[in-house]
Amino acid sequence: MERNGSLVRAARPEDLPRLVELIHEHVAYEKAAPRAAGLAERLGPQLFAPDARLWALIAEDAEGTAVGYAACSAEYSFWDARHYLHMDCLYLAEGARGQGLGQDLVRAVAELAREVGAEQVQWQTPDWNEGAIRFYDRLGATGLPKRRYSLPVDVSRA
């Protein structure tokens, strides 16, 4: 998807170093704990495997620099008995915001959902991120009152 010299496209293996930089920016923006070393080594094989059900879309500026990304995975809703695409992340570097790239990324995610047979895209955003909430509301998305939990699991005991 190209508009005004900018481009949204599927991530390629050579994008991995810049994608990891953007992820670290995103983590800092959301005031989350820094991620463990080796993110590229863990992410690359999952993202670029031939049968991957994980996708990253890259937003480039007019100069061809990756300035944002959306990360998605295929999920299944038992309540609806249907597949959906979970948009785990949507991030644009500070200087790339307000130029329509976020909307381009969301459109590309919706197109990806259609391509993989998912009837819906779902995501979450921190309740303090009022700019993101206004953006998603303008797109016509519906907010759902839920809280996300995380439970660490010791995989060494498996």
Image (cartoon, rainbow, N blue to C red):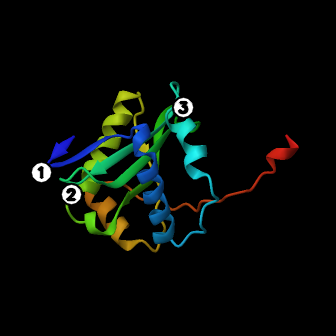
| In this picture, residue 82 sits left or right of residue 106 | right
**Closer to viewer: mark 1 or mark 2:** 1
Q: Quadrant of residue 8?
A: top left
| In this picture, residue 78 sits left or right of residue 6 | right
Q: What is the x, y in percent for residue 7?
A: 23, 46
Q: What amino acid type is highlighted by mark number 1?
A: Asn
Q: CA distance from mark 3 to mark 2?
A: 34 Å
Q: Which mark is residue 4?
A: 1
Residue, disc 2: 100
Q: What is the x, y in percent for residue 77?
A: 55, 38
- Is 126 in front, or is 36? 36
**Closer to viewer: mark 3 or mark 2:** 2
Q: CA distance from mark 3 to mark 1?
A: 40 Å
Position of residue 39 relative to residue 115, above or below, is below
- Kindly tell me whether residue 31 is visible in this rendering: yes
| In this picture, residue 50 sits left or right of residue 149 | left
| In this picture, residue 51 sits left or right of residue 101 | right
**Closer to viewer: mark 3 or mark 1:** 1
Q: Quadrant of the N terminus?
A: top left
Residue, disc 3: 81
Whether label 3 touches label 1, CB < 8 Å: no
Q: What amino acid type is highlighted by mark number 2?
A: Gly
